[in-house]
Image: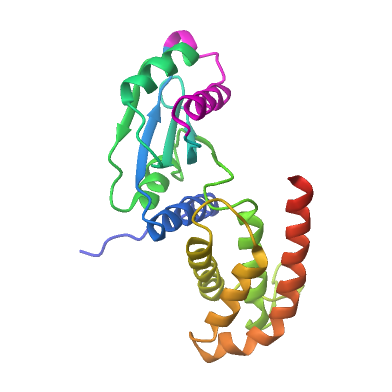
Amino acid sequence: MVEKIIEWSTKQKRAYHRVKSGVRLASLTNTPIQHIVLTTSEIAKNRNICNDFQVLRKRVKRRWNIDLSYFCVKTYEGYGVLHLVVKDKGFIPQRWLSKNWNEIHKSSYVYIKRPPKHIANYVVSQYVSNQKSSYQRCSWSQTWVCQGFVKIWKYCKHLSKRESDWKINLFNGDWYKPVNILLALRIWEKFIEGLSKKFNEYSVDWLLLLDKVYWNLDKYNEVVSKICDKIYSEVVVYLCESQKTLDEFK
């Protein structure tokens, strides 16, 4: 019997990339992953669970000196639930979490689960489903991957178009170059590897990271090596601008 292949929606693919990037970085830096579930009781159904979670984060920082690095999925389960994929940077007692969550959100149930082997697939398939979903939104901390990583990913996709053939849009007649997703993922994988090796703690030097990507891409195939010289100067300019923006933000 042939199993039916279910195509993921754009929303699911986007969420998968966001959570998978952080999980991959955690794997490369040997950082354990936890699955934490924050619930809402009936008396707290009108409270903003996201705002209360940020209060909990600050308490964790003050009490345990741990800056939670997380990917969060908010769902409509019950009166509202947050599913957190958290990088385990230190021990936080479950009893302490429950006590403080009850003080903040008037809900005492906090679950710490052992994450399945393929946590990214699990989160997307369970909580970011296509139809009849209780999914509301997802978010992440700046330290989940690095600041501005979505912008960098979009630029990787832009670079991957270089070797694509021109195609015509049958609806409006415009010509365009499609994204070469396999090439974009190769560039992104090397970026994540560089991030893990150079910056185990949160620190950003885009020029060094993409320079490492550039010198490693030519090992893959001839197509990649052809575009390296074409894109390198543009990458340098782009990342210098990103670094200036980050400096101004700091």
Dominant secondary-structure state across the stretch colored magenta: helix
Q: How many marks?
A: 0
User: Does the magenta-highlighted stretch encompass residue 45?
Assistant: yes
In the image, taking residue 84 as reference, residue 14 lies left or right, namely: right
Identify the residue at image location x=77%, y=54%.
245
* Residue 166, image x, y percentages: 69, 82
Identify the residue at image location x=51%, y=30%.
61
* Residue 117, image x, y percentages: 28, 52
Q: Which residues are magenta?
A: 42-65
Residue 38 vertical placement versus 185 (above, below): above
Near-viewer residue (212 or 52): 212
Residue 48 visible, this angle: yes
Quarter of the image that includes the N terminus: bottom left
Question: Hey, which quadrant is residue 150 in on the image?
Answer: bottom right
Query: Hey, which residue is sitting farthest top in the picture?
Result: 43
Near-viewer residue (116 or 70): 70
Identify the residue at image location x=27%, y=40%.
114
